[in-house]
Every structure is written in C-alpha cells, then in structure tokens.
Image (cartoon, rainbow, N blue to C red):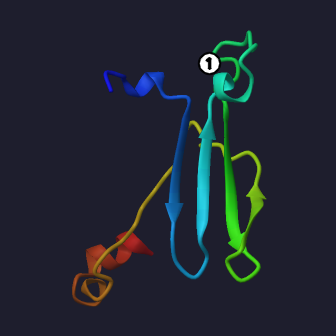
Amino acid sequence: LGRTGREQIVSAVSVYGPRTTLCIGLTNEARNSNTTTTETENPGIVLEVTLVNNRTEWKLSRNDIRIQAAGKIFAPGNLRASNDNPAYGALIQ
C-alpha cells in the first residue's frame, strides 16, 4: 500500500468473548475533514462499542477512552509460585 502508520486516520480492535467489544480510534481528520486543530491540541478520539441484544446491535459503551500520561501496570503470572517464593509473594501483594 505504500503508507506508514502515521498516515492512518482510523483504527479498530475487537475483543470477542462473553462480552464482545470494538474499540475504534478516529483522528481529527477522520472525524472532520475541515479540522484546523493540531494533533497535540486534540489527538482524536477512541470509542468503545459493545455487541448487545443477542449479538444483533452495537451500543456505545464508552465515548472517550484516554490513556493516562503515567501509570503503573503489573500483571502477575504463576500465582502458585508466590506460595513457594516469599519475595515473589510480597511483590504481588
């Protein structure tokens, strides 16, 4: 296609399961072709829709998803190891 990721104006990702959701990222260009704001002033918007009504209809579940500038993420794995390794157990508590 000869395009870079920075040239994308729309992106989507879906999570299928008991609760099927679709997150849609729209740049200002995708939302309004006449926009004059820069990406740093208003970087666009991310919407989340959820499949409802016996999987026949999409409903807006969140209208403006934002990522915090700073955060802390810790996803512990192998929780049984916390019983045998006190240092690991202390880390995940």
- Give x and y (percent) for residue 15: 51, 66
- Give x and y (percent) for residue 65: 68, 47
Type of amino acid under label 1: Glu
Q: Which sits in the foreground, 89 or 71?
A: 71
* 70 lies above or below 37: below
What residue sits 67% from the left and 77% below the top?
Answer: 55
- Give x and y (percent) for residue 8: 49, 28
In the drawing, does residue 61 fall left or right of residue 16? right
What residue sits 59% from the left and 71% below the top?
Answer: 20
Residue at which label 1 appears: 39
Displayed quadrant of residue 26: top right
Q: Quadrant of the C terminus?
A: bottom left
Q: Which sits in the foreground, 43 or 35?
A: 35
What residue sits 74% from the left and 14% below the top?
Answer: 35
What residue sits 33% from the left and 27% below the top?
Answer: 1
* 80 lies above or below 52: below
Find numbered disc 1 in the image and state the secondary structure of the residue it sits on.
loop
Numbered-mark total: 1
- Give x and y (percent) for residue 86: 28, 81
